[in-house]
Image: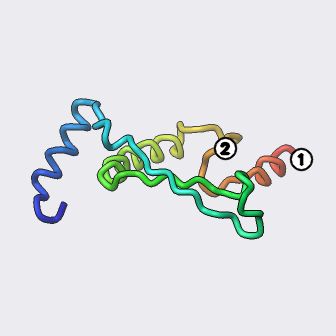
């Protein structure tokens, strides 16, 4: 990326303007992380972690920023929407209805 920034920028611009995300960027490497205090032979003792291509992460950042700005803005998601949002938990949802 640092060696050829103009090429990198052109690739990212092309994916945004075409709406096509290269299929190789969609691949993940699955790594299983053992959970502490669990028996090693138990499948539930492993936490899956998907490693994504760095170019994919860089490409997704501006899209995520735009979506977050929209969903967290004045006309975005309802204040009662707690799932999949930063700084909101199931405890917050329970407290909101009590």
Residue 25 screen position, x and y as percent: 33, 44
Lateral position of residue 1 relative to residue 22, left or right: left
Tell which residue pokes out farthest to the front in this image.
Answer: 41
Q: Which residue is mark 1?
A: 98
Q: Secondary structure at mark 1?
A: loop
- Badge 2 crowding class, 10 Å Cα cut-off, few under 14, some 14 to 19, many 20 or more, is few
Residue 88 screen position, x and y as percent: 68, 53
Total tally of numbered discs in the picture:
2
Residue 32 screen position, x and y as percent: 57, 57
Question: Label for residue 80?
Answer: none
Whole-angstrom CA distance, mark 1 to mark 2, is 18 Å
| Residue at 19% over, 60% down | 1
Image depth: mark 1 or mark 2 in front: 2
Query: Mark 1 vs mark 2: which is more N-terminal?
Result: 2
Q: Which residue is mark 2?
A: 83
- Badge 1 crowding class, 10 Å Cα cut-off, few under 14, some 14 to 19, many 20 or more, is few
| Residue at 28% over, 31% down | 20
Snapshot quadrant of residue 12: top left
- Camera-nearest residue between 56 and 70: 56
Lateral position of residue 61 relative to residue 81, left or right: left
State whether residue 51 is above or below residue 13: below
- Camera-nearest residue between 92 and 21: 21
- Camera-nearest residue between 49 and 73: 49
Residue 28 screen position, x and y as percent: 43, 47
State whether residue 24 is above or below residue 43: above
Tell which residue pokes out farthest to the right in this image.
Answer: 98
Lateral position of residue 70 relative to residue 98, left or right: left
Lateral position of residue 96 relative to residue 67, left or right: right
> Contact (CB < 8 A) between labels 1 and 2?
no
| Residue at 41% over, 51% down | 52
Q: Secondary structure at mark 2?
A: loop
């Amino acid at each position: 990326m640092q060696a050829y920034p103009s090429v990198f920028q052109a690739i990212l611009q092309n994916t945004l303007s075409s709406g096509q995300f290269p299929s190789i960027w969609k691949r993940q490497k699955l790594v299983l992380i053992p959970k502490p205090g669990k028996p090693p032979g138990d499948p539930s003792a492993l936490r899956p972690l998907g490693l994504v291509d760095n170019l994919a992460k860089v490409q997704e950042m501006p899209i995520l920023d735009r979506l977050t700005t929209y969903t967290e803005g004045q006309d975005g998601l309802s204040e009662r929407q707690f799932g999949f949002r930063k700084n909101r938990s199931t405890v917050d949802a329970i407290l909101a209805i009590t």
